[in-house]
Structures are given as structure tokens and as C-alpha cells.
Amino acid sequence: MSLFSDAQAVIPGGVNSPVRAFAGVGGEPVFFRRASGSRFTSEDGREFIDYVGSWGPMILGHAHPDVIEAVVSTARDGLSFGAPCVLETRIAAKIRAMLPSAEKVRMVGSGTEATMSAIRLARGHTGRDKIVKFEGCYHGHSDSLLIEAGSGALTLGVPSSPGVPASLAEHTITLPYNDIDGVENAFAELGEQIACVIVEPIAGNMNMVPPVPGFHETLRRECTQAGALLVFDEVMTGFRVARHGAQGLYGIGPDITTLGKVIGGGMPVAAYCGRADVMASVAPEGPVYQAGTLSGNPVAMAAGLRTLELIDSEDFWTELSAKTRKLVDGLAAAAGGAGIPLAVEAEGGMFGLVFTDDGPVRSYAQVAAADIERFKAFFHGMLDEGIYLAPSAFEAGFVSGAHSDDDLEETIAAAAKVFKTL
Ligand code: KE4
């Protein structure tokens, strides 16, 4: 028996989220019992430098003392009220201060809930049914969006899921990421039927794929001209790639932004936000219904608010970006030294590693054509060296403010050793 087989006896697939099951890399997942700073410790006492960070939220590192204190002190005053509390107002105001396009903010419990609600809002606000998404982008598991999705859906090789009615899927138009002509053609043909375009401004669920010049400008122009809404899904990139999100990096103003991960600091928090006139359609102010028992939960708000307060400085972002750049440059040099083709990307605290000689990677097709088997061997080699990477070739990696130069150098040295075995 193993911890995994025990879990499989009572949980589907032994996990509460598919990508954790190591299906994309083989072997049994590691079970962890505690985490602190840049590292966590497995149930069998092994220590790992962590580059998953709970899939993005742990931007300050694990168990940051100020965040823990905020959680503990807030919890002592009650876990949940189901009634308004001032912390909800404060975090909404903080998000608006950090993200100028977020004139109004609705808190929810997960990124899926945020994007599902954003789609419903776009459809309700415009009176239109069609939505546009991009192949390889993952926006959570709501029906309209689980079409040619990335992340775990890609890892399991099922980019579209059973259980999504064809009558619903037909309203989702899927285009290749970074395909400017494809976007212009779709709008030329169906523009007046399109409620919104939803896009990861930097795709992080087919490894890491940045936008090509003009891609976001095209989305913005076509949406404006057609009366469709532009939804930036920044659940991953928001306050992860830059102080003001990917929209701040690219100078694009979306109509709606979805957020998650970092804004909860490790607690279940997400949000959708945007133009006041659009958000005015959300109940109870408007007719588009959305609700949640634990939305705006005070303990979760306290964790997210403290996290945002601690990362909202130029120094934090300068230092984090330099760490991530040092990591990927070191990995690229080590791979080169071993004759291993490796394409790397880095933005803020997010990075991508693709085993291909066809870089830079700007499309799903390039990721799909990369050497997945070599990635699997690299993943396990690094795991044996005490380095924990995302257990999938279709995921991005994350550096935190707690990662030290020693951590980075230890990681690069481990990679140099592992590359020689590939
Ligand atoms: P959640 O429902 O998992 O909180 O968020 C869904 C979501 C929405 N949008 C983007 C851009 C996302 O990356 C995600 C979730 N990301 C995955 C990892 N790439 C979560 C990990 C998991 O599924 O366990």
C-alpha cells in the first residue's frame, strides 16, 4: 500500500485535481505535509525546492509569517459571516488600485467560478451567445470553456471533456493562439454574434506562450468594433507576471478581467472585475445572476489582502523578475552545455521550459511537437535531485520572493547534472 493507493481508494484518481496525479510524467505523486518559504517537505521527510507554488498563489513563498498572522488573527474573530465585512471592501479597493481597468470587483471562490461568471456576464450584457477562446488556453472547467482546453485537459490528452452538451459547445469558437488572421476572419464572419473573447494574455496552460506583437491589439480592436467584450483571464498572470498584471505589461485595457491564485495568497479566492457599466449588470445591481456562500470570506480576504499589500512595490517586482531570469538563463546555459535543445521564457515570477529546437515558442502546435518524453525524464531527474517542477509539460513554473540565490544555484547545478543523463 502507498499513500497514493490509500487516496485512490476514496478519491477519484487519488487526487482532488487531475494535474496533481502525475499522469503527465508517470510514477506516483509526492505527498507533502508542510511548506515554508521556497521549500516543502514530503510525508517521508524529503525536502524539495518548489517551483509550482500551489500553481501560482504562493508568490511570497509558503507560510509567509505576515500572511499566516493575518489568517490566524482574522479566524479568531470568526470564519465566515455570510454577511458583508469591511475586508471585502478593502481587497476590492486594493485590486482596483493595482489594476486600473477593475472599476468594480466581485469576489468568488475559484478561477473557474470567475471565468464562468465572466462569460455569463458578457452574454447577459451583450445579449449574444458566441464566445471565442484559444486552443491550449485553460480557463477552468465550466462547460463553455472546457473546449480544446489546456492544463490538465491537455496533460490527460482530452482537450475537450465528455459531459459538455454539443448544443452548448457549438457557441464556443476556438482559434489558434496568436493567430491574428484567424481572429480577424472570425470577427468578419460572426462578429455581431460574439459576446466576448476570453484569452490568457500570456498563455500558461500550454507551458508558457507569450503573445506575438499585435495579437492583443487585434483582439482589442476587433472586440471594440464588433461590440464584443474583451476578457483577460489573468487568474494565473494577474499579479504574477507584473505588478499591474499582463494588462499593465502590454498596455491593453480589457473590459473584464478574471483573477485568482495570488489574490488569495493560498486561500480559495478569485474575482471577476472590470468596467463599471459592464459590472453593473451583475446581480443584485443588475439582472445577471451569480452568488456564493463563501464569496468574500473574511479569512480568505485577509490572506489575499496581506499578500497584495506585500507585493505591491517596484522593489519586489524588480527582485522577483531578476530571480526568474537568472533561473531560466542558468537552465538554458546548462542545457546548451549538454547539447539539449531547450526554449525558455520568463516574465515576472513565471517561467516556461520547452524541450524543442524550434524556439521561441509562440503556438500550441510548437508545444505539442516538443519532446515530451525528454521532459518526463527531466522532471523525474530533478525530482530525484530535490527540485519540484510542475508534473506536466503543459504547465508553467513559478518563482517566489522566498527563492534565494542559493536555491537558484542549487537548481541550476541539479539541472546541469540531469541534462547529462537525457
Ligand atoms: P481554478 O478553478 O483552478 O481556481 O482556476 C481555473 C483557471 C482559470 N484560468 C487560468 C488561466 C488558470 O490557469 C486556471 C487554473 N490553473 C491550473 C494550473 N494551470 C490549476 C491547477 C489545477 O487544475 O489543479
Image (spheres, grey):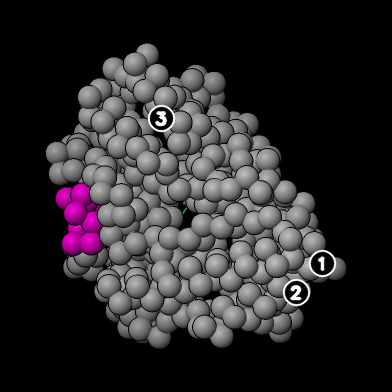
Within-10-Å neighbours for mark 1: few <14, some 14–19, many 20+: few
Q: Nearer the viewer, residue 28 or 71?
A: 28
Verify CB contact (< 8 Å) between mark 1 and mark 2: yes
Find disc 2 in the rendering and name its residue.
417
70 in relation to 116, above or below: below
- For the point 38% across and 76% down, the residue is 319
- Residue 59 visible in the snapshot: yes
* Residues rendered magenta in the picture: 96-110
- For the point 52% across and 52% down, the residue is 208
Measuring from the top left, give residue 246's x and y in whole percent: 34, 53
Which amino acid, mark 2? Lys
Mark 1 and mark 2: Cα distance apart in space:
7 Å
- For the point 27% across and 74% down, the residue is 313
Q: On residue 421, which mark appears? A: 1
Find disc 3 in the rendering and name its residue.
180
Q: Nearer the viewer, residue 403 or 47?
A: 403
The earlier-in-sequence mark between 2 and 3 is 3
